[in-house]
Image: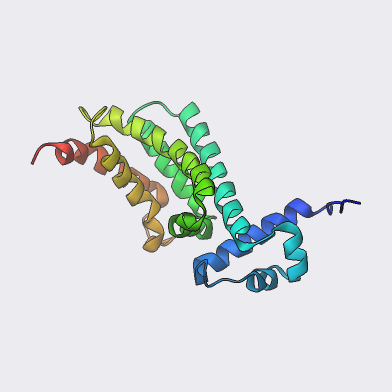
Amino acid sequence: MARTRAQDYVEKRELILHQAAQLFAQHGYTGTSISMIAKACGVSKALLYHYYPDKEAVLFDILHAHLIRLVALMEAVVATAPPGAPRLLAIGEALLDAYRDAYAEHQVQIANLGLLPEDKQAVLRGLERSLVTPVAEAISQVVPGVAGTTTLKPLTMAWFGMINWHYLWFREGRGFSRADYARMACQLIICGGKEAIAPG
């Protein structure tokens, strides 16, 4: 007879993912054991295995859930923000706000996605492309002449670099808000993009 799911199955699964993300961010994927995850969640290893067969499955679900949330957020912004500069700014603000409560998941995505098998990476890379495409489209609308060129991708990745790595230095409440930084990143692309892609 199949084992029935507990009524709080979803809540416990989310707790496992959150605690595991914290541990992966702090100790690294290879430095974190199933025992450590179980202890952080206040459950036994046996119960943890009821939810996940191994650490790899935990890592995949952390990243999949994180990226699904970001893609849904991106779709909402694209549906409501006008094209060009307003959309690029809105995307930056939305991502920086989303990272506020997902620093661990964000760090795990950057550092550990490549540790997964190729088939699982492919799923996650597809979600990442769903985030990159709207940004590239917005940049192509604010930087004259970049659309359809080989420089659009580097310029887009430069924007993501500014947004995605902010957690290394950004601290709340020090006179410079997330919205301020999103605006700065947007203006650096708008004002500097044309010069950046010009032949040397």
Residue depicted at x 20% and y 27%: 145
Residue 43 visible in the current orientation: no
Whether residue 130 is visible to the viewer of this picture, yes or no, is yes
Residue 129 lies, in percent from the top left, at 43, 38
| Residue 9 horizontal/vertical position (percent) | 78, 53
- Does residue 85 appear to the left or right of 65 in the view shown? left
* Residue 41 at x, y percent in the picture: 70, 67
Q: Residue furthest left?
A: 200
Quadrant of the snapshot with the C terminus: top left
**Residue furthest front in the image:** 118
Q: Nearest the camera: 112 or 188?
A: 112
Residue 105 in the figure: left or right of residue 40: left
Q: Indicate the colouring scheme.
A: rainbow
Tell me which residue sits at (52%, 32%) in the image: 76
Picture coordinates of residue 164, whole percent (x, y): 39, 52
Which is more toward the observer, 75 or 24?
24
